Amino acid sequence: MKYFGTDGIRGQANVGPMSPQTVLRIGQAIGLALREGEDGPKVIIGKDTRVSSYTIEGALSAGLCSVGAYPFMVGPLPTPGVAYLTRGMRASAGIMISASHNPFHDNGIKIFDRNGFKLPDSVEAQIEGLIDDPELEHKLVQGEHFGRARRVDDAIGQYAVFLKERFPKDLSLEGRRIVIDCAHGAGYRVAPKVFEELGAEVFCINDEPNGLNINQDGGSLFPERLQGEVLKYRADLGFAMDGDADRIVLVDERGHVLDGDHILVMCALHMKRAGKLKNDTVVCTIMSNKGVNLALEPQGIQVLRTGVGDRLVMEAMKKEGAVLGGEQSGHLIFMDSSTTGDSVLGALKVLEVMGRTGKPASLLAEAMVKLPQVTHSVKVPCKPPLEQLEEFSLALSRYEDEFAQSGRVLARYSGTESKARITVEGEDWYRIKEVAGELESILVRDITTWKDAHR
C-alpha cells in the first residue's frame, strides 16, 4: 500500500504522509469511510507525547469535522487506552497518533474499528483510495452538517479503572516494590496511577516528557537504566514501556531483562494450570525464540507462528480461538481483557502469576531456556525483494540448511523503518554471531549493487 504499513501510517513529522496537508486528507478519508455506514460518526483521537502530535491532532480533527464526523480528543493516552475508549464510548473508530518506539521526529497514525481491533486490509485500501481521490474536496459537508470536536477530560481515569479491574480482587500489591520506565511517553501518567492505587510502592524513571525526549535512552528498547534502578531499590519487578505503551519489557528482581517470549511462556503455563488457556493454544511470530516451543509444547500447549506484527498475531488468535498471543518485542495480547498489546496490563498479568504462585519473576522465567539468538538491524536505502538479491539469497539458503536442525535463520524488512533485520538462532553463540555478521555484509553489498543498477 502507498500509505499504510504493518502498523498504520508512519513517517517523519511534517514530511510526506505526516505533513499537515496529507493528514488533513487522511482525516477526511477516514470520516468519509465511516460516514458510509452512519451519519455523524464519533471518532476517538489519542496521542503520545511527541511535540508533533499536537499538529497532527489538529489536522485530523479538522479533516474529520469537514466531512461531518465528530472527533473526541482524549489527550496523551496509551494506544490500548484508545482502543478501550473506542469500545467503551461506542465510537465508530479510534485513532492513535504515535510512532511507537521511533524517535521523536517521527510520527504516525494507528486506526481501530468500533470493537477496538486494528483495521483489516480492505478498509485500509478504501481509505487510501479516498486520500488520493481527486474529487475529495467535492465530498465535504456544508452548513449545519459540519462535525464538532470535543475533549474528554477523564480519559485517564476511565482507562485506569478498567486496568485495575483486570487485577484479581483477592490479590494485593501491598508490599510490592515496582520500578516503571515510562519512556517519556503516553503511559507516564496512567501507569504509576494504576500501581499506586493497587497498593504498590512505585518508583518512576523517564516520566518527564518534553515533546522531544520520547524513547530517548530509555523505554523498552533501552532497559539498561531500569536494570540499575531495580537493583538500587531492591524492587520485586521493573517494567519498561515504549512511546505509546503497547509493548513491555520486564526486569526481574535480580536485574535480568525478560522479553515478550519470557512473559508469554510464564503466563501461558499459569493460564494452562488454571484452565484459562482457551484451546491450549498460544500465538507468536516467526521472531520468537525456539525456546517458546521447547517450554510450552511438552506441557500440551500448541504454539502457532505468524508473520511479524501484532495485527497478524491478533488475526490468528481470532481464527484459532486463542486468548493469549504476542511478540518477542513485547506486544502481549490477552484477548480476555483487551484487543491490542498493553504494557500495563502485561505487568499486571505477570504480577498476578507471581501472586498466585508465590514465586519471584526470576524463578518463573526459568521455565523457558532461550536458544542463543542474534538480531542485526541494518539500515537500507531501499527495499528490493530479497529473492532478487542473488548473492544474499544463496547465502541465506546455505545457512538455513546449516541451522535447519539446531536453530533458525530469518531475514526480513521492517514494516515501519528503513531497515532490514537478520536473525540467527542456534546452539553456538560464536557461530551465530559470525553468520549474522556475514549476512549483513552481503546484504549491504547486494542492495548497493541493486540500487546502482536500477537508477
Image (cartoon, rainbow, N blue to C red):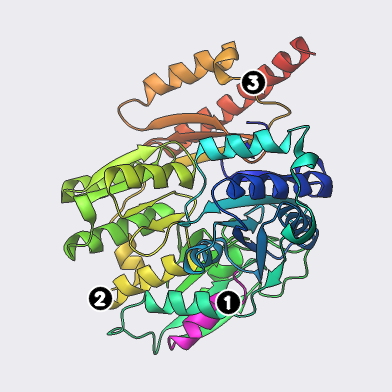
Q: What element does badge 2 sit on?
A: helix
Q: Which mark is residue 356?
A: 2
Q: Report the mark closest to the observer, 3 or 1.
A: 1
Q: Which is nearer the N-term, disc 2 or disc 3?
A: 2
Q: CA distance from mark 2 to mark 3?
A: 50 Å
Q: Please name the residue shown 61% across and 77% down the image.
A: 189
Report crowding for label 1: few under 14, some 14 to 19, many 20 or more residues within 10 A (C-alpha). many
Per the model, the C-alpha gap separating discs 2 and 1 is 28 Å
Write down the residue under mark 3.
384
The prevailing secondary structure element of the residues shown in magenta is helix
**Which residue position is annotated with label 1?**
156
Residue at coordinates 30% horizontally, 70% vertically from top-left? 353
Classed neighbour count for the residue bearing mark 3: other residues with Cα under 10 Å, few (<14), some (14–19), many (≥20): some
Residue 192: say if magenta: yes
User: Residue 447: within the magenta?
Assistant: no
Mark sitting earlier along the chain (3/1): 1
**Magenta-colored span:** 187-199
**Residue 329: image location, x then y, percent:** 49, 51
Question: Is 261 above or below relative to 420?
Answer: below
Q: Could you say where residue 298 lies in the image, as x and y percent from the top left?
A: 17, 47
Question: SS class of the residue under badge 3?
Answer: loop
**Quadrant assignment for the N terminus:** top right
Side of 133 relative to 348 (left or right): right
User: Which residue: 46% across, 83% down?
Assistant: 177
> What kind of element bears circle 1?
helix
Residue 369 visible in the shown view: yes
Q: Position of residue 47 (x, y in %)?
A: 67, 63
Return the disc, 2 or 1, that comes first in the chain's sequence: 1
The type of residue carrying mark 1 is Ile
Give the residue at x 71% y 50%.
27
